[in-house]
Structures are given as structure tokens and as C-alpha cells.
Amino acid sequence: MHNSPFAVVAKAGDTIGDLSTPRPIIDEDRLAANIARTQAYMDKHGLNFRPHIKTHKIPALAAQQVAAGAKGINCQKITEAEVFAAAGFEDILITFNIIGAEKLARLAALNECISGLKVVADSTVTVDGLSGYFATRKPLAVLVECDTGGGRCGVQTPEQATALAKRIDLAPGLTFAGLLNYPKPGAAAEVQAFLTETLSLLNIEGIGCPIVSNGGSPSLFEAHLVPAATEHRAGTYIYNDRSMVRAGHCGENDCAMHVLATVVSRPTADRAVIDAGSKALTSDLLGFTDYGQVVGYPMAVITGLSEEHGVIDLSKCEGKRPEIGDKIRIIPNHTCVVSNLFDTMVFHRDGVVTRVEDVAARGLVW
């Protein structure tokens, strides 16, 4: 994917310890176990599962998820969806309000290429824009996005959801496909109440609701507490990260992604500097006060990132400390952002590289 003649490329058979850093590495066995565990949970509770591919942006991994039993995929932007449509995926849900002529033109072209494209809307402006463009084209399936407490996009009440569903149902070029929400963690009861009331109102209006899409990695193993939902969406689970460990969804040994970094300086006994800064680890804190967990050094604290440097406070570490030239592994706070920082992802089993995959949808954020 990277056209530079100086790009550092790993190959199958290389050992992790010989790789140039900084570089994310993915443990194949942990990856497979994460996919299997989550799909088994969804199957047990009779939920369709729609993985969010923004975590990995790699068609080969989406194929693994679908082979395990996932129903379609979730993309965040049109350009992401285009990559996965080109790779053969048909059932794609884009969970973002799509506004503007240029994006609508790309959306229409994508809709002509695949059989199962779906989008969301939370306002009459979005719905009318979609209808105005699709009225003379292949119809587009649209879900109403509901704010059930997450405080992001979404209509605010069941009555508003019903009114927007009616508008979609009557709009030329559009088909009402269902309801969607992204809740705050621990809010299953509120989500269930909102969805139940909305479904009741839709039933009174005689409007069918094929899909009720609940979502979010923070709510992953609470999905069964929202029986009104027909499907759940989540992405981070495939790699897991420090935020998922904190949420109780996994342990550190379930984190398939580590960022491999090299200690390049030890200016003082209590400070180490690594070659992984904000361009490798992301400055996304997700509520933490530091920038990742150093594997094998639980008391080490990554206190700051500049673009190319990471600073680690070793003052609380007992025993051996990492020295210049040592390679360390870091569990990132937020794995999804790390995926968008690298052209390729290196996979390994027991420290031996198994494959290298292009991060095919990297940088495709519109």
C-alpha cells in the first residue's frame, strides 16, 4: 500500500523481535479467540452481529468475522464502505448522516454496486436530501438514528423517531429499514424502554421495522439486556484494548494488538524515551491519565507523547527496568485509532510473523 521505496515491510517467517519499530503487531490466536467468543455470545442470545470495521479497516479480517457468523458489516464513512464493497461485501450499514451533493453521488454509485446498502438519518434535512437525490434512482434503505442517552447523534424521543420513520416511509426513493442507537454504557434499561415505546408507536402507524440495531463496544456483553434489538454492532472486540480491559470485557491476555516500540533514551534512572509517540500510540486518552499499558512493566507510566517520542516514568518500577535498545510492547488505550496510523498490520503467532495485511481503508474518513 505504501509506495515509498524506503518502506519497511515485514514478511512471513520474520521474528517479532527483529522488526523495525514503532509497529503494531497482532496475535493471530488472540484475534481468532476474540472473534469466536463474541460471535458465540451473540448466537447464544439470538442476536445478529454486525462488526464495525473501523477498528481494523482490513477486508481479510471482516471476512473472518463473517465466516464466524457475523451478518454484514458496519462502516462509518462512504469511502470505507467503497473499499469493502470492492472486496465483495454486500450487506453494509453506514452509521453516519450523509450530507451534500458530492457524498450523495458516491453513495448512489455504491448503492448500485451492492444489494444490501443501508444508511442512517436523524433529521428531516438529512432525509429530504437523501430523497431528493434517490427519487429517480435505485431506492435506498434508511434507519432512524435514536439518541438513547449516548449524547451524540439521534432523535431525542420515540415520537420524533416515529415521525421521521413516517417521513422516510413516504419519501420517494427511500425505504424505512429500522431503528438504530449508540447508547452510553450501562444503559440497557433506558435503551429497551426507548425502543419498546418507539416500536409500539410504529405499530400503531402500521409501519414495519425490520431492523433494530443496538451498538457499541462499551455495551458489548450487555446486548442481551436489550431484547427489542435484532442486532448488535461493535468493533474494538476483535483486537481489544486497554479501555475494553477497564470495562471488564476482557483481560490483558485477550488484547491481540500490541504496539512494539524501542527504548531510544534513558536520560535519567527514572525516565525512558521510546520511539512511539502520538503518530503510533494516539493521544486519545479515553478517560485514562496516561497513554497505554507497558506489558511486563505494570508500574511504568507513559506520561507524555510528542509526535515521535513517548516518555515513560519508571520511578515506581521495582527490579529490572527497560534499557536503551530494548523492545517493549504496549497495549494502546484505543486500538481503532492506531489502525488508522499505519499502512500495514503485522500478524504473528508465538512471535513469528504469519502475514502482513494492508490497512486498506486507512485515511478514508469521509
Image (cartoon, rainbow, N blue to C red):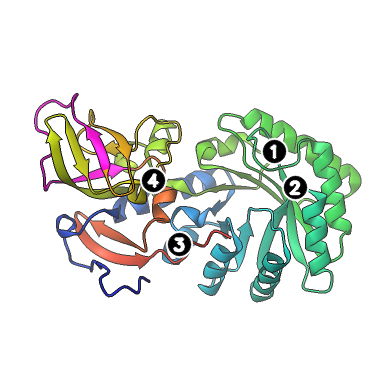
Q: Amino acid at mark 4?
A: Thr
- x and y percentages locating residue 192 in the rendered image: 69, 34
Precedes in sequence: disc 1 or disc 4: 1
Q: Amino acid at mark 2?
A: Asp
> Judging from the image, what secondary structure is the residue with disc 4 in?
loop
Observer-nearest residue: 79 or 273?
Answer: 273
Precedes in sequence: disc 3 or disc 4: 4
Q: Is 96 left or right of 323, judged from the image as shown? A: right
Q: Is 158 left or right of 29, judged from the image as shown? A: right
Residue at figure coordinates x 56%, y 32% from the top left: 185
Q: Which residue is mark 1?
A: 147
User: Does any portion of residue 293 appear in the rendered image?
Assistant: yes
Name the mark nearer the viewer: 1 or 3: 3
Precedes in sequence: disc 4 or disc 2: 2
Name the mark nearer the viewer: 1 or 4: 4
Q: Are marks 1 and 3 in contact (CB under 8 Å)?
A: no
Q: Which residue is mark 2?
A: 122
> Judging from the image, what secondary structure is the residue with disc 2 in?
loop
User: Does any portion of residue 256 appear in the rendered image?
Assistant: no
Q: Is residue 5 above or below residue 317?
A: below
Which residues make up the magenta segment?
Answer: 310-331
Residue at figure coordinates x 56%, y 70% from the top left: 85
Q: Amino acid at mark 3?
A: Arg
Spatial CA span between label 3 and label 4:
15 Å
Q: Which residue is mark 4?
A: 282
- x and y percentages locating residue 137 in the rendered image: 79, 74
Q: Which residue is mark 3?
A: 362
Residue at figure coordinates x 69%, y 40% from the top left: 228
Residue at figure coordinates x 35%, y 52% from the top left: 31
